[in-house]
Image (cartoon, helix red, strand yellow):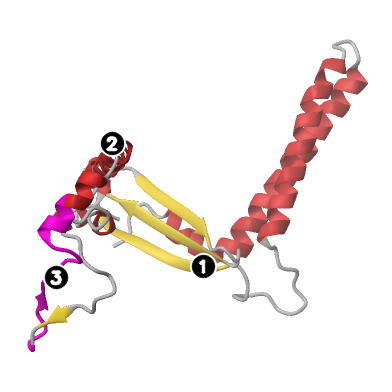
Amino acid sequence: MLETIQFKFPTVQVDDLQWPLMTHSGSPLPRKGPCNARQMRSSRAEASDSEDDSNASMKAYWESIVKEHEEQTFDASSLSTSVMSDFPSHWTVVHISLTPDKSTLFISRQNASSEPLMFCVPLKGRRESDEDEHLTFDDAVKELAEIIRLSDQGTRNAVNVRNDDSQARAAWWAERNTLDKRMRGLLENIEFCWLGAFKVLVLLENIY
């Protein structure tokens, strides 16, 4: 972006229809402008004040963009320094991301005491046979959404359960217990089907 913005307001006007000039060694040569200095002064004098104000405002805007992005640029030394050095030594950061086709997980593990670790985990094809039912990402999200919906519904219905109605209270808690077990089953399926043996790399305190 910074390289592109500097060509929005070139200091020297050139004719875009001219081929670029270069020496035999390949070095670029300056091109002749489309008009001489007298013509350029004349064309500038003919420009209206509104156009000048518009150009000045546009140039000021892009200069502010350049200033903003120049402050966010990184040099090679800053990129070679891990941000984990600012964290406590006993902290471990695990980042999990999903590919757009929802078929693979990228898992990274970082801490201040060891080198960062990143590995790719396919969600399907590691152990499943033709007879095994595969837990897809969409199925897991659908099950989680249904558990949340039933949990919210049970929470709203709690206002209708009277303290002196022991059967209603027992039924309400039984429903909550069922949802807890359903959530536990979903997490166990995610852990077994998706992470599998790779969960060991996430749980280990130190990896050398």
The kind of residue on which mark 2 rests is Asp
Residue in view at x 59 percent, y 63 percent: 194
Instruction: Give, as a single range, the part of the protein colored magenta.
Output: 24-41
Between marks 3 and 2 in the image, the one whose residue lies nearer the viewer: 2
The kind of residue on which mark 3 rests is Lys
* Residue 182 in the image: above or below residue 98: above
Q: Left or right: where does residue 85 sit relative to residue 189?
A: left
Which residue is label 3 attached to? 32
The quadrant of the rendering that contains the N terminus is bottom left
The kind of residue on which mark 1 rests is Val
Judged from the image, the secondary structure of the residue bearing numbered disc 2 is: helix
Residue in view at x 74 percent, y 51 percent: 142
Residue in view at x 43 percent, y 60 percent: 201
Which residue is label 2 attached to? 49
* Residue 25 in the image: above or below residue 184: below
Residue in view at x 92 percent, y 22 percent: 167
Q: Main secondary structure of the magenta part?
A: loop
Residue 56 within the segment the image draws in magenta: no
